[in-house]
Amino acid sequence: MTTKRIAVVSAGLSTPSSSRQLADRLLADSAGLLQERGVEVEAKVFELRDLAHDITNHLLMGFAPPKLEEALDAVASADGLIVVTPIFTTSYAGLFKSFIDVVDPQALTDLPVLIGATGGTPRHSLAIDYAIRPLFTYLHAIPTTTGVFAATGDWGGGGDGVRSLPDRIFRGATEFADLVERTDRSELVSDPFALDRPMGHLLGGLAGE
């Protein structure tokens, strides 16, 4: 039986968070669909708020502490990635972007990505297409056509006027499962001599002093 690895990254800041709740539901539907097709799923879930200090240290010092290294390795070795971020000031959370900044860009090549986002009102859903999707496209990942946004009202049984949150989750999960099932990243090999992170940020910092 085929086994696929899925990494899940939630950038929610509160406990509990709607971002983590959405991430769990996206994973549940995706894993269920894959298992129906005879594909086993190994999933690892990471809360970025638990890694905030490690991410900052990586940005400043250029190396990852063990807990952050585990998350980075999980993303690099995954067959699919689910990401969920709250929307702040019309875009993704700063903590989410900081995490992406420390991920090896080559690790995302040809990686299926299911994008989720949370916010107060449905109008924030536009951030998926003008901010988050272009980020992953630039990094040569393969985002699903459907991104899933959950507004505050969705959790109370409301909808966006077109389809309910469970329907949107299922649609996104279906597209994601299709990509994960047929994607083979086993031949992707990272350069063992490459730096974990370009040194330009350090040189730039020295130039500005």
Image: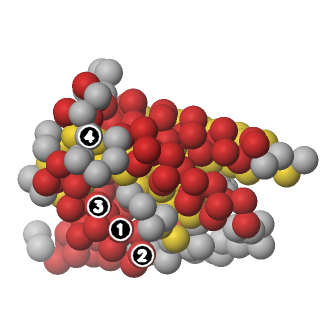
Q: What residue did someone put label 4 on?
A: 159
Cα gap from disc 3 to disc 1, whole angstroms: 6 Å
Q: Residue at x 65, y 41 (%)?
A: 31
Locate residue 162, reporting x and y percent: 28, 51
Cα gap from disc 2 to disc 4, whole angstroms: 28 Å
* Left or right placement of residue 44 versus residue 97 in this view: right
Cα gap from disc 2 to disc 1, whole angstroms: 6 Å
Q: Amino acid at mark 1?
A: Arg
Disc 2 to disc 1: CB gap under 8 Å? yes
Kind of element beneath mark 2: helix
* Left or right placement of residue 186 versus residue 167 in this view: right
Q: For residue 130, what is the image quadrant?
A: bottom left
Kind of element beneath mark 3: helix
Q: Earlier in the sequence, mark 3 or mark 4?
A: 3
Q: Amino acid at mark 2?
A: Thr
Q: What residue did someone put label 1 on?
A: 133
Q: What residue did someone put label 3 on?
A: 128
* Left or right placement of residue 93 versus residue 200 in this view: left
Q: For residue 192, what is the image quadrant?
A: bottom right
* Left or right placement of residue 112 versus residue 190 in this view: left
Q: Nearer the viewer, mark 2 or mark 4?
A: 4
Q: Earlier in the sequence, mark 4 or mark 1?
A: 1
Which quadrant does the C terminus fall into?
bottom left
